Image (cartoon, helix red, strand yellow):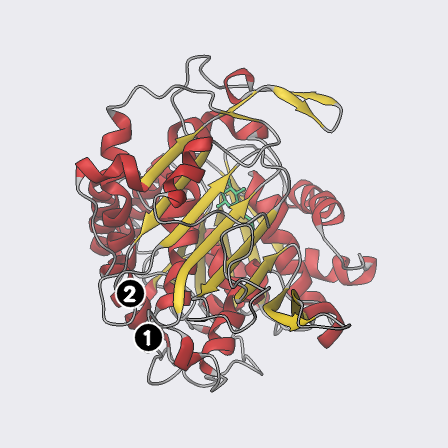
Amino acid sequence: MENPFEDRLRFERRVPPCAIVIFGANGDLTQRKLIPALYRLAYERRFPPGIAIIGNSRTPMTDDQFREKMREAVQKFLEDSPFDVDLWNDFAKGLFYCSGDIGDPAMYAGLKVRIAQVAEERGTAGNVLFYLSTQPSQYIPVVQNLGAVGLNNSAGWTRIIIEKPFGHDTESSNVLHDAVRQVFRESQVYRIDHYLGKETVQNVLAFRFGNGIFEPLWNRRYVSHVQITAAESIGVGSRGGYYQEAGALRDMIQNHLLQVMATIAMEPPAVFEPDAVRDERAKLLRSIRTLKPEDVATHAVAGQYGAARVGGEDALGFRQEKGVDPESQTNTYAAMTFFVENWRWAGVPFYIRTGKRMPKRVTDIAIQFNDAPHSVFVDAPIMSRSGRGPNLLILRIQPEEGISLRFRSKQPGAGMRLRPVSMDFNYGSSFGERSPSAYETLLLDAMAGDSTLYTRQDMVDASWKAVQPVLDVWSETKHHFPNYDAGSWGPQASEEMLQRRGHTWRVP
Ligand code: BG6
């Protein structure tokens, strides 16, 4: 029986034994994130005996060749953790490989036999966690094939983790959902959004609902607007082919950043239980105003980076990247203004922006509070030169992890000269311990049957609904790309979008 509430606050997560079957085991995500996270969990002694990992991909490999390949991946991608040879040798005994084409129904009969053998050998108690880390076009065939051989119901529990993207638009997301629910019950389905697993995003919940002093300010009476920025300095690298079909709005805003916004703006859940938390997130996402097509031009901005000199070196433009159409209309930058139609947030703009090839990698959330209604300090006008009031709360998601509150202080000396200063909390110096990666947290949660940090189909639907009008208008628009230089903060039109309401983007 699945009981996700055994350890509600997740201190001593008790993980049962299980087999983890990874489809797409030769891919980038498996090597960069999944296997290093699983190894790290073993390193932290978070696993019971009886864990087995079965990789599948088309490339023929023996178990030993797979183990060798995964060892190289762990050594290459394991961040901030030592590689322990003895531990690895033990961990590697639980790694198995089953080659075969995921489009071939016969492969699943073989996989079923392999899962049974491994269950016997490792003592997985018949529990199976599937992980879909393949091309999204393969999701439906894999799910159907699993159902056809009865792999949707193992002797123990069976769960399936699905990586984003959940569809390409509202319609295809529903098609995927329908196909999945023919085979798996909703309680078996774990749609992963790795942003929700980040410690700093989870901390937004702790910050908001574990303290009494911020929540009274957390509404339209005190908040002027919210800015969410997720900037990446890298380009699209080897992912040009995928990215060209997706673009920044689909790749980051529809999923990660709307989930972050939901975490910032949702109502307090009554209890910290999966569906109580997810109900509140879903409610918030459903309250986002749907744009009319005629409002898209003033509420959304698309950008694409062009070639430029960055840090003394020539950087390619998106259209020159490998696998990208030289006339590509794909957005590598997207910014949107959202409004939440409820009593707490009516009239407060939530600005979200994301882009590749920005000046630096930074993700943060800035809550801009209203100005003081009147300044008694004649020489110290309330507004700063940037047009922003002094009170700003910044939740730093990455790479810096912490929280800063900016306020005005008296500058030492004669007279009343005021200057903005900040009060800072920093994870590293306050806790001095390593934060688990998002994938460590989320994999452990799925194994323990806790879906709090996973997305539900109603949230996926609501997020598509929030961006669909923009996708529709943009698909009919001939964009004048490139419209920002690699290494810059994005197109001018994005500044103009904020200026219409008297706001400016802060420089993170
Ligand atoms: C992925 C996107 O979901 O998130 C990538 O597909 C993006 O394009 C990545 O680079 C960002 O994740 P993180 O954790 O590095 O901020």
Task: Tell me the SS state at disc 2.
Answer: helix
Q: Is residue 490 left or right of residue 224?
A: right
Q: Is residue 471 shown above or below 442?
A: above
Q: Is residue 278 shown above or below 68?
A: below
Q: Nearer the viewer, residue 485 or 242?
A: 485
Q: Amino acid at mark 2?
A: Leu
Q: Amino acid at mark 1?
A: Glu
Q: Is residue 262 shown above or below 430?
A: above
Tell me what residue is drawn at x 58 percent, y 31 percent.
235
Name which of mark 1 and mark 2 comes first in the sequence.
1
Give the image quarter of residue 455. Answer: bottom left
The circle on residue 209 is: none
Tell me what residue is drawn at x 44 percent, y 48 percent.
111
Q: What separation in Å lies between label 1 and label 2 (alpha carbons)? A: 8 Å
Q: Is residue 467 left or right of residue 310?
A: left
On the image, the x and y values in percent for residue 371 come to 45, 66
Task: Tell me the SS state at disc 1.
Answer: loop
The circle on residue 267 is: 1
Badge 2 is on which residue?
284
Tell me what residue is drawn at x 39 percent, y 49 percent.
502
On the image, the x and y values in percent for residue 454 come to 40, 63
On the image, the x and y values in percent for residue 321 come to 55, 20
The reply to whether the C-beta atoms of the residues labelled 1 and 2 are less than 8 Å apart is yes
